[in-house]
Amino acid sequence: MTDSRHKFGKLFTLDVNSYVKASYLNSQVQDDFTRQTLTCYAGGPEYFIIGPQKNTVMILIKMGGSIITDKTQPLTPRKQDIERLAGAISEMEEPVIVVHGGGSFGHYWSVRYDMHTEARDYDTTGVATVKNSMVRLNLIVLEALLKEGNKPYVVSPSGFMAGPNPIESRVEELARIAGSGMIPVTYGDALWYGGEEDKGARTYILSGDKIMTHLAGILRPRLCIFALSEDGLYRDMKSRTLVDVVSTRADTPPVALQAESTTQDPFCGPDGRMDVTGGMARKVGEATAISCMGIDVAFVNGRYTERLLGAASGEAFLGTLFEGVGLKEK
């Protein structure tokens, strides 16, 4: 997909520091192109990236909660959309790993029990309820994948996470599973955080978007696709002007981008947030961090199979491409 950006219109540069700060994300990008270096942080220094690295022939796909569930109705899957996504995945010709969000399943209960991505001593009934709802949604996704001819292999995120950190050897095992012809499938969830005994039973919500960054940082796939219920990232919400390409390169002036949801989430908490994991703002932050690793990231409307397959094959597609930045050592 290295030449796909030439098939788009005007190239935009994301003012990452301003956007991330405004979005209250824990992602941060610092750049010094006079030294031809780029340093990226995504939730901490474990994603310190400098210098070019070879990407793996593999695609990571995030099935967004807004595309696989009806967020206006608690605990309501969009089975037709899930099957459409599963059908598109069955046509992809390289190893695939799937991550899915919580939508009106996990997010619904997370809001009800006031649970967030910050580790705290949350109500353990809430933790159990969120986990149970995610297993239910995951089963629906697995059944759709199997129905469309895929070979899904479910992996709970607790199988490759230790507190807030990914376990590298177990994440690498996912790549080997994908290479066998099966499709590892994982999901956002409520997880045990751990810590000192005097800090109680701390848990936290691990978003599917954050999982994408964790996996990308270790596996370095060729491409990451976020399947959304929108066409991509809009430069302006009123005119719904779609941004074709976003880059963190310094050779074009930055533009302000808007990524707010176009619909009011009936499950939002008292602060008006779309969901407890940060909604579209979180996606932009994670996509930016991944692109800083030299990995292309595509935002695509998951209801259109041809767009998903176009993004996967490197052809022109309607959506937003976060251009993977080519990095050079000092």
Image: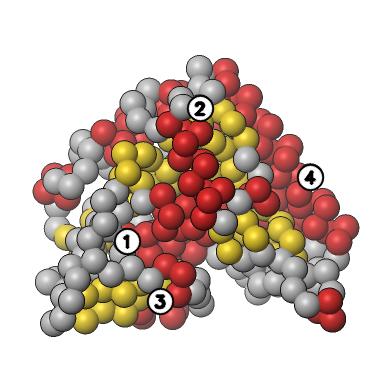
How many numbered marks are there?
4
Q: Given the image, on which type of amino acid does mark 3 rest?
A: Gln
- Say which element carries label 2: loop
Tell whether label 2 touches label 1 (CB within 8 Å). no
For discs 3 and 2, the disc positioned in front in the rendered view? 2
Local SS, label 4: helix
In this rendering, the answer to whether 240 lies above or below 14 is: above
Q: Nearer the viewer, mark 3 or mark 1?
A: 1
**Of the numbered discs in the image, which one, if any, rests on residue 28?**
3
Q: Is residue 50 visible?
A: yes
Which sits in the foreground, 270 or 190? 190
Q: Is residue 29 above or below residue 74?
A: below
Q: Give the structural element (helix, strand or loop) at label 1.
A: loop
Q: Earlier in the sequence, mark 3 or mark 2?
A: 3
- Identify the residue at horizontal 22%, vertical 60% (top origin): 52
CA distance for labels 4 and 1: 34 Å
Q: Which mark is residue 132?
A: 4
Name the quadrant of the N terminus. Answer: top left
The image shows residue 168, relative to residue 150, as above or below, that is below
Mark 3 and mark 1: Cα distance apart in space: 13 Å
**In the picture provided, is 275 more to the left or to the right than 294?**
right
**Which residue carries the number 2 mark?**
182
Residue hosting label 1: 293
Q: Nearer the viewer, residue 328 or 147?
A: 328
Q: Quadrant of residue 276?
A: bottom right
